[in-house]
Image: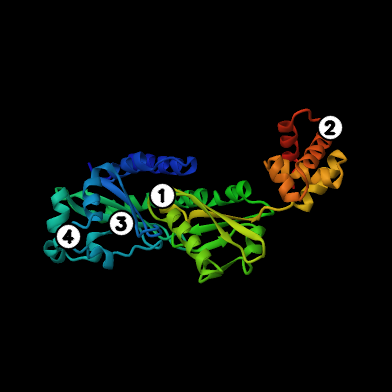
């Protein structure tokens, strides 16, 4: 019987596509694909990682891959020589090395054989056309078996269309998440930027576009703030979201426009699958916050119309909706606490809200 189990290979390919569609882990179906291909295990290598290439390994080769990533391997000549393309199928060791070179190469002889490995078949699953970096599939066969023969590579090549379709689906799924994020987090006042693994930014809504050139700028594709202090905070925020352990965080910086500040919040888009397949690594949410003062004219106008309030009552109601206490409202509106209390009671009566908490909640729902 040949080393390639064609029926099992086809079934494993189908399961990989299914995992991509459902957003599930590729680990088990990829392991099944490797065994059907007569390999000890498989690796997915993505070039678009935030801290360099990302390698996901199945259990059969995990120990050797961990040692490789830890820097315990001699120089790997495969990095300079093995360059599969979408126009070709799987490349084997003898496509890029002679038997004599392999027999003398420390990476093959001293490192791979230490972990029972000896032969490769490598294919490109996705190119870098969408900015996420190339993705390679590597099959690693035991050194106790023979290298991949041409007829075996032909059987593997027959499975490539399904594997490439799975990679395409996974990229669409992960990158497509930025749209619902933008809808969920963004609005007319809050800008949403997508940040890729290299720190390059793209505005995702009109509010983000309006921020550019005024409070933020793009320099070489990277977001920057106008003052040195604000930019230092912005860069620290983005670095925390991009570098392990990829923490989401928030900060406040002074805006260019007078009397306002910018609230910056980074949302890390985490996960090893995303590192491999997606360009976006984080989202940056940006909105203006006015320094304490009077309520916005839009909110007071809405409350006046909704409940028939006077201008003074509407201002108090708007600040109540913001969570301000009566002493603070009196200070911000330059009125006495007693006057503020009277405006509040009158507004509550007009709105039909017997309790202050209910009035605050009602006004908050109508806040512009």
**Any mark on residue 107, and which?**
4
Closer mark to the observer between disc 3 and disc 4: 4
Real-space CA distance between mark 3 and mark 1, rounded to the nearest whole angstrom? 13 Å
Could you tell me which residue is drawn at 67 percent across and 61 percent down? 259
Viewed as shown, does residue 45 lie left or right of 293? left
The answer to whether marks 4 and 1 mark residues whose Cβ atoms lie closer than 8 Å is: no
Image x and y of residue 147, in percent = 20, 54
Graded by Cα atoms within 10 Å as few (under 14), some (14 to 19) or many (20 or more), the crowding at tag 3 reads many
The answer to whether marks 3 and 1 mark residues whose Cβ atoms lie closer than 8 Å is: no
Real-space CA distance between mark 2 and mark 3, rounded to the nearest whole angstrom? 75 Å
Real-space CA distance between mark 4 and mark 1, rounded to the nearest whole angstrom? 28 Å
- Vertical comparison of 154 with 228: above or below: above
Tell me, yes or no, if residue 182 can be seen here.
yes
**Any mark on residue 349, and which?**
2
**In terms of depth relative to the viewer, which is nearer, 6 or 44?**
44
**In terms of depth relative to the viewer, which is nearer, 316 or 321?**
316
Badge 3 or badge 4: first in the primary sequence: 4
**Any mark on residue 366, and which?**
none
Real-space CA distance between mark 4 and mark 2, rounded to the nearest whole angstrom? 82 Å
The answer to whether marks 2 and 3 mark residues whose Cβ atoms lie closer than 8 Å is: no
Residue position for label 3: 122
Could you tell me which residue is drawn at 24 percent across and 65 percent down? 96
**In terms of depth relative to the viewer, which is nearer, 102 or 80?**
80
Tell me, yes or no, if residue 267 can be seen here.
no
Closer mark to the observer between disc 2 and disc 3: 2
Closer mark to the observer between disc 2 and disc 1: 2
Real-space CA distance between mark 3 and mark 4, rounded to the nearest whole angstrom? 17 Å
Badge 4 or badge 2: first in the primary sequence: 4
The answer to whether marks 2 and 1 mark residues whose Cβ atoms lie closer than 8 Å is: no
**Any mark on residue 163, and which?**
1
Q: Quadrant of the N terminus?
A: top left
Closer mark to the observer between disc 4 and disc 2: 2
């Amino acid at each position: 019987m040949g080393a390639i189990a064609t029926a099992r290979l086809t079934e494993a390919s189908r399961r990989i596509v299914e995992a991509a569609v459902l957003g599930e882990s590729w680990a088990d179906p990829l392991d099944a694909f490797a065994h059907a291909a007569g390999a000890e295990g498989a690796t997915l290598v993505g070039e678009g990682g935030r801290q360099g290439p990302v390698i996901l390994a199945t259990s059969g080769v995990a120990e050797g891959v961990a040692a490789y990533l830890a820097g315990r391997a001699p120089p790997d000549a495969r990095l300079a020589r093995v360059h599969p393309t979408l126009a070709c199928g799987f490349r084997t060791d003898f496509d890029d090395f002679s038997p004599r070179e392999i027999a003398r190469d420390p990476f093959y002889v001293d490192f791979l054989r230490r972990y029972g490995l000896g032969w490769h078949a490598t294919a490109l699953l996705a190119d870098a056309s969408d900015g996420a970096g190339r993705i390679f599939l590597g099959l690693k066969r035991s050194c106790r078996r023979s290298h991949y023969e041409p007829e075996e590579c032909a059987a593997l090549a027959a499975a490539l269309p399904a594997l490439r379709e799975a990679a395409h689906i996974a990229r669409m799924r992960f990158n497509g998440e930025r749209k619902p994020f933008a809808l969920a987090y963004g609005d007319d006042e809050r800008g949403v930027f997508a940040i890729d693994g290299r720190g390059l930014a793209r505005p995702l809504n009109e509010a983000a576009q309006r921020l550019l050139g005024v409070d933020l700028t793009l320099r070489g594709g990277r977001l920057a703030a106008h003052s040195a202090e604000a930019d230092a905070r912005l860069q620290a925020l983005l670095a925390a979201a991009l570098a392990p352990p990829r923490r989401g965080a928030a900060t406040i910086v002074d805006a260019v426009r007078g009397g306002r500040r910018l609230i910056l919040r980074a949302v890390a888009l985490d996960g090893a699958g995303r590192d491999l397949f997606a360009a976006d690594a984080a989202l940056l949410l940006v909105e203006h916050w006015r320094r304490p003062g009077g309520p916005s004219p839009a909110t007071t106008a809405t409350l006046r119309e909704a409940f028939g309030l006077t201008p003074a009552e509407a201002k108090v109601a708007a600040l109540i909706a913001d969570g301000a206490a009566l002493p603070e409202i009196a200070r911000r509106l330059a009125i006495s606490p007693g006057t503020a209390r009277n405006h509040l009671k009158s507004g509550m009566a007009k709105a039909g809200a017997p309790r202050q908490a209910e009035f605050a909640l009602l006004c908050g729902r109508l806040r512009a």
